[in-house]
């Protein structure tokens, strides 16, 4: 009953219980600081660069499946999946049943966390 789990551990799997675990395993040294509930930050004031703008532009307010994002961006699905994960961890999009939805737009940005 534990063969599958043991095999994953042998392959170098890590226990992931939250997005921060992924960031720590990537060794990026990034950390998240919570903002107040009604606090906002302007992307222009913070000089925030849009990550993976080519992929982000293809995720809208409606649920957009991964394969549709990849097709619109003209990129392979495995490459887009990695970019979508980065965008999700940064708070630009959210994974929902059936795909992804955009959480915020460039310009005036409402964040629940700030990347430092």
Image (tube, rainbow, N blue to C red):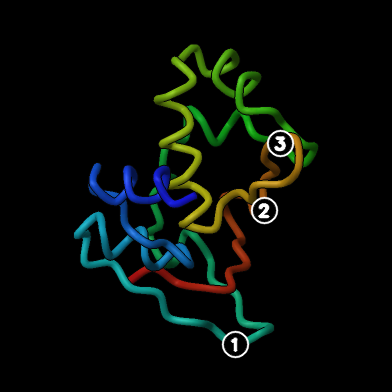
Look at the numbered disc 3 and give the secondary structure of its residue: loop
Residue 7: x, y in percent?
32, 43
Residue drawn at x 64%, y 54% as measured from the top left = 104
Look at the numbered disc 2 and give the secondary structure of its residue: loop
Task: Please give left or right for residue 82 compared with residue 60 in the image.
Answer: left
Residue 22: x, y in percent?
36, 58
Q: Earlier in the sequence, mark 3 or mark 1?
A: 1
Look at the numbered disc 1 and give the secondary structure of its residue: loop
Residue identifier under label 1: 36
Residue drawn at x 65%, y 19% as measured from the top left = 68
Q: Are marks 2 and 3 in contact (CB under 8 Å)?
A: no
Task: Please give left or right for residue 21 compared with residue 30 in the image.
Answer: right
In the rendered structure, find residue 84 and report the number of the disc placed on it.
none
Question: On screen, 56 above or below 89?
Answer: above
Looking at this view, name the residue that lies furthest to the right: 62
Task: Please give left or right for residue 63 compared with residue 107 in the image.
Answer: right
Q: Residues within 10 Å of mark 1 (few under 14, many from 20)?
A: few
Residue drawn at x 41%, y 36% as measured from the top left = 82
Q: CA distance from mark 1 to mark 2?
A: 17 Å
Q: Earlier in the sequence, mark 2 or mark 3?
A: 3
Residue identifier under label 3: 60
Residue identifier under label 2: 103
Residue drawn at x 49%, y 60% as measured from the top left = 43
């Amino acid at each position: 009953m534990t063969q599958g789990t043991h095999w994953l551990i042998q392959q170098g799997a890590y226990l992931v219980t939250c997005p921060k675990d992924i960031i720590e395993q990537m060794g990026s040294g990034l950390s998240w600081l919570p903002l107040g509930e009604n606090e906002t930050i302007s992307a222009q004031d913070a000089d925030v660069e849009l990550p993976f703008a080519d992929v982000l532009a293809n995720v809208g307010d409606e649920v957009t499946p991964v394969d549709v994002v990849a097709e619109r961006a003209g990129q392979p699905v495995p490459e887009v999946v990695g970019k979508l994960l980065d965008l999700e961890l940064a708070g630009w999009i959210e994974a929902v049943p059936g795909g992804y939805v955009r959480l915020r737009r460039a310009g005036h940005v409402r964040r629940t966390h700030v990347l430092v």
